[in-house]
């Protein structure tokens, strides 16, 4: 999770648990997270607790959800079709990605200058369910 989203959620630095193992950024640099926090994430009617690392680096995204969340929810993803499907309440639901938002993130990433110190936020409609929008 990037600082813009963290601050936007009204979370404070005292809410973070210590986490000092370095991560490798998309640019190949070693990044030490500011900390870690566990937050509830709603997908459809299901709520799953997810651990987020707070990293102060540039990204056109607000947060990146990784494999642990995908596995917990039972998601099957298709980057080709920009959608994920997951079981919920005896049925299979799907979240469909936005081509326009993905393209906007790509343009921002290409235009990014490495000297930027703050993270950028993407369009809130990056992923949208057929029934509900997710930020």
Image: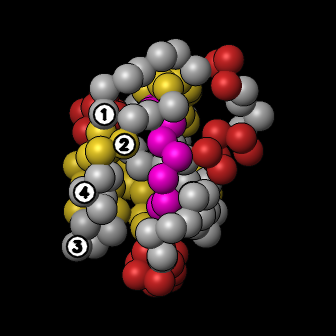
Position of 47 relative to 7 (above/below): above
Report the residue marked by disc 3.
80
**Residue 46 showing in the rendered view:** no
N-term-proximal mark, 2 vs 3: 2
Magenta residue span: 52-59
Report the residue marked by disc 1.
22
Residue at 52% of width from left, 46% of height from top?
56
Q: Disc 3 versus disc 1: distance between alpha carbons?
A: 31 Å
Report the residue marked by disc 2.
31
Q: Disc 1 versus disc 2: distance between alpha carbons?
A: 5 Å
Q: Disc 2 versus disc 3: distance between alpha carbons?
A: 29 Å
Point out residue 42 in the picture as x, y percentages from the top left corner. Answer: 55, 36
Report the residue marked by disc 4.
28
- Extreme residue in the right direction: 10
The local secondary structure at tag 2 comes to strand
Point out residue 128 in the picture as x, y percentages from the top left corner. Answer: 53, 61
Residue at 64% of width from left, 39% of height from top?
6
Residue at 77% of width from left, 34% of height from top?
10
Q: Are marks 2 and 3 in contact (CB under 8 Å)?
A: no
Q: Are marks 4 and 1 in contact (CB under 8 Å)?
A: no
N-term-proximal mark, 1 vs 2: 1
Point out residue 30 in the picture as x, y percentages from the top left corner. Answer: 29, 45
**Residue 25 showing in the rendered view:** yes
Q: Are marks 1 and 2 in contact (CB under 8 Å)?
A: yes
Q: Are marks 3 and 4 in contact (CB under 8 Å)?
A: no
N-term-proximal mark, 3 vs 1: 1
């Amino acid at each position: 999770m990037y600082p813009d989203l963290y601050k936007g959620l009204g979370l404070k630095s005292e809410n973070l648990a210590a986490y000092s193992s370095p991560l490798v950024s998309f640019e190949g640099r070693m990044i030490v997270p500011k900390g870690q926090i566990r937050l509830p994430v709603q997908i459809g009617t299901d709520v799953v607790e997810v651990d987020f690392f707070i990293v102060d680096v540039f990204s056109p995204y607000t947060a990146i959800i990784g494999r642990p969340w995908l596995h917990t929810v039972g998601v099957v993803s298709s980057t080709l079709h920009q959608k994920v499907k997951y079981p919920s309440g005896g049925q299979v639901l799907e979240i469909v990605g936005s081509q326009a938002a993905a393209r906007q993130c790509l343009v921002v990433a290409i235009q990014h200058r490495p000297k930027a110190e703050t993270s950028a936020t993407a369009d809130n409609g990056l992923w949208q369910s057929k029934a509900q929008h997710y930020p």
